[in-house]
Image (spheres, rainbow, N blue to C red):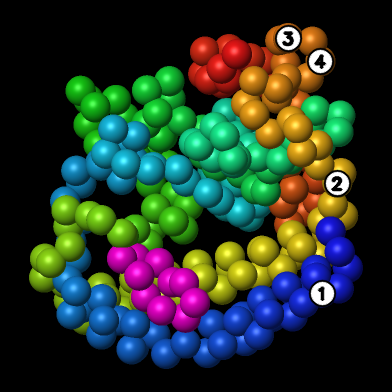
């Protein structure tokens, strides 16, 4: 990555961070109260059949889940890849796929790995330590504005106190994500992309059975080798 471009990006993010840290939570809470929200426990935000249920998370959140569940990180997360097979990850000249950050593992049916099966309940098995994206759904901040995702719970009455709690969580998430992105850029050293290797069929390395990822996050770069099995969903 070009050094000047990288420092410009970091500069812009640091400016956004300064603004984000001073957001008035009461203003955000008033907007949330006006929109209205109550979680109906429908489980739709966790299940693939109802839309993009990808849960991106930062290293501190992964650690929190690992500490509270005794589950190994390989059973919690996977490299954050796009669902769009064509223009997703970046493949380098060695055939290694570079991704930025992690997402929660999903079951073979695409549902979050931590929601009970649909015929059992919509309970989250890691509710107390669930990632910020789950805690704040359907609200999120982008470019200093409150945004709202599709959700059946919208429009329901919410108290001022609950609105303020969500506002605090939404802003904390915004700040944490900007800080994490800054740290990621500072660590990221770049790689040489292979422009002819973007198609999913050429993502294989180590023979035909494995694919190798370089996952860049705020802690550095991590190599992940995954077996190509049904859940990996690589198409020949
Ligand atoms: S971690 Fe819990 S709340 Fe978040 S998507 Fe998975 S089941 Fe849903």
The quadrant in which residue 7 appears is: bottom right
- Which of the labelled discs sits on residue 7, or is there none? 1
- Which of the labelled discs sits on residue 208, or is there none? 3
CA distance for labels 2 and 4: 19 Å
- Mark 3 burial class by Cα count in 10 Å: few <14, some 14-19, many 20+: few
Q: As displayed, is residue 208 above or below residue 139?
A: above
Which residue, given by chain and number where applicable, does mark 4 sit on? 206
Specify whether residue 128 is in view.
no
Q: Which residues are magenta?
A: 139-148
Which element is circle 2 on? loop
Horizontal and vertical percent for residue 196?
A: 76, 32
Point out the tag, 1 or 4, that comes first from the N-terminus: 1
Which element is circle 3 on? loop
- Mark 2 burial class by Cα count in 10 Å: few <14, some 14-19, many 20+: some
Specify whether residue 125 is in view.
yes
CA distance for labels 3 and 1: 39 Å
- Mark 4 burial class by Cα count in 10 Å: few <14, some 14-19, many 20+: few
Which residue, given by chain and number where applicable, does mark 2 sit on? 191
The quadrant in which residue 120 appears is: top left
């Amino acid at each position: 990555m070009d050094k000047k471009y990288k420092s410009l990006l970091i500069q812009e993010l640091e400016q956004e961070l300064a603004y984000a840290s001073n957001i008035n939570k009461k203003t955000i809470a008033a907007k949330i109260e006006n929109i209205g929200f109550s979680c109906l426990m429908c489980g739709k935000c966790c299940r693939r059949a109802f839309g993009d249920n990808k849960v991106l998370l930062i290293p501190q959140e992964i650690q929190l889940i690992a500490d509270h569940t005794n589950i190994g990180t390989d059973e919690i997360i996977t490299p954050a890849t796009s669902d769009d097979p064509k223009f997703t990850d970046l493949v380098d000249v060695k055939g290694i796929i570079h991704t930025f950050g992690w997402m929660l593992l999903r079951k073979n049916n695409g549902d979050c790995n931590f929601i009970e099966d649909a015929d059992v309940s919509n309970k989250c098995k890691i509710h107390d330590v669930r990632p910020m994206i789950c805690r704040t759904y359907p609200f999120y901040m982008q470019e200093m504005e409150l945004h709202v995702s599709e959700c059946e719970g919208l429009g329901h009455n919410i108290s001022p106190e609950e609105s303020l709690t969500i506002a605090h969580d939404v802003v904390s998430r915004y700040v944490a994500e900007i800080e994490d992105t800054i740290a990621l850029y500072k660590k990221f050293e770049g790689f040489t992309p292979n422009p002819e290797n973007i198609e999913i069929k050429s993502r294989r390395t180590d023979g035909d059975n494995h694919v190798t990822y370089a996952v860049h996050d705020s802690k550095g770069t991590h190599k992940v080798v995954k077996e190509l099995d049904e859940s990996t969903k690589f198409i020949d």
